[in-house]
Image (cartoon, helix red, strand yellow):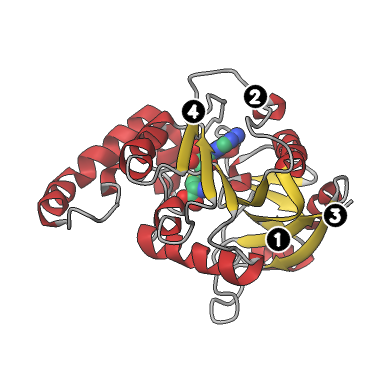
Amino acid sequence: MDFRRKLFYFLSPEVRFFVRRLYFLPMDICDSILDKKDSIRPPKGKIYIGSGDFQKTGEHFVDLLKEKCGLKAHHQVLDVGCGIGRIAIPLTKYINNQGGYQGFDIVKKGINWCRANISSKYSHFVFKHIDLKNDLYNMTTDQAAKNFIFPYAENFFDLVILTSVFTHMMPEDVDNYLSQIERVLKPGGKCFATFFIINRDIFKLMNEGKGMKFEFNKGHYFLMNENVKEANIAFEEEYLLSGLGNYNFQIDSVDYGYWSGRSKSVYSDFQDSIIFSKLMS
Ligand SMILES: C[S@@+](CC[C@H](N)C(=O)[O-])C[C@H]1O[C@@H](n2cnc3c(N)ncnc32)[C@H](O)[C@@H]1O
């Protein structure tokens, strides 16, 4: 693991937020003067969810959701681990009043920003803060994700999305979330979730020194850092697919990304993704 990443994980979530805010402050002040008043965009210093082009990535995900999951303007969408609105912002241009959007996250700062800047303009976009422990994002509680019951009615959502969320969750927590997703999805509804998936090909690439390194093999899952376990978590493919098989789901597609050293010209997305649907009966 490179030194910068190690240092980043060494800092507490609060210190990381603070350093980022400070680093981008001059740029954010300029942007706030130049920004068009009607555009919704968090200041760079508040984007705590990782690097990459925030706007382009969000728009790309929305295109994928339309193309691969059949997302329609009147659908009810649940964005689990919605962060600071990367997907919600482009969705405001698509989901109409007949449909709706619900997002929840364990980081209060992101949810507060989304409420103030998105829900204030689009009342059918609703954000909830849920105080759960994650050793990368929220250390202020001991409440575990493995016990959390999603605060939504059963059979309600057409689509559930988790972009770069299961990549930060331990197996027992993922298992509980799968059971909750099964409960809140309508029969026939879909889930789009991204992962780091390990299989034989990936072992080969890792041994060749390619891609991200998950050095700590825990059997069916792999960690990048043993001190901050939820910094990045990869799952063994067979374990993941058989776990999905424990629920009333059908797997629609498994698409690999290039995080593992696969060729970017063939695999255009960074993380792997799985689309699965809730069976009709
Ligand atoms: C890499 S960020 C991705 C955010 C957002 N999905 C996106 O694509 O912009 C990971 C997010 O997962 C959230 N998270 C981690 N554990 C969670 C949990 N148990 N339940 C809900 N959100 C969680 C973090 O707070 C963080 O906002």
Q: Nearer the viewer, residue 272 or 179?
A: 179
Decide if ligand 1 comes within 8 Å of the CB at mark 4. yes
Name the residue nearer the viewer: 89 or 23.
Answer: 89
Residue at position x 59%, y 75% from top? 267
Q: Which residue is mark 3?
A: 280
Sequence-first tag of 3 and 4: 4
Mark 1–mark 2 Cα distance, whole angstroms, equals 26 Å
- Residue 213 relative to residue 236: left or right: left
Residue named by callout 1: 275
Q: Nearer the viewer, mark 4 or mark 1?
A: 1
Q: Is residue 11 above or below residue 50?
A: above
Q: CA distance from mark 3 to mark 4?
A: 37 Å
**Earlier-in-chain disc, 4 versus 2:** 4
Mark 4 residue type? Asn
In the displayed structure, 17 sits above or below 33; it is above
Of tags 1 and 3, which is closer to the observer? 3
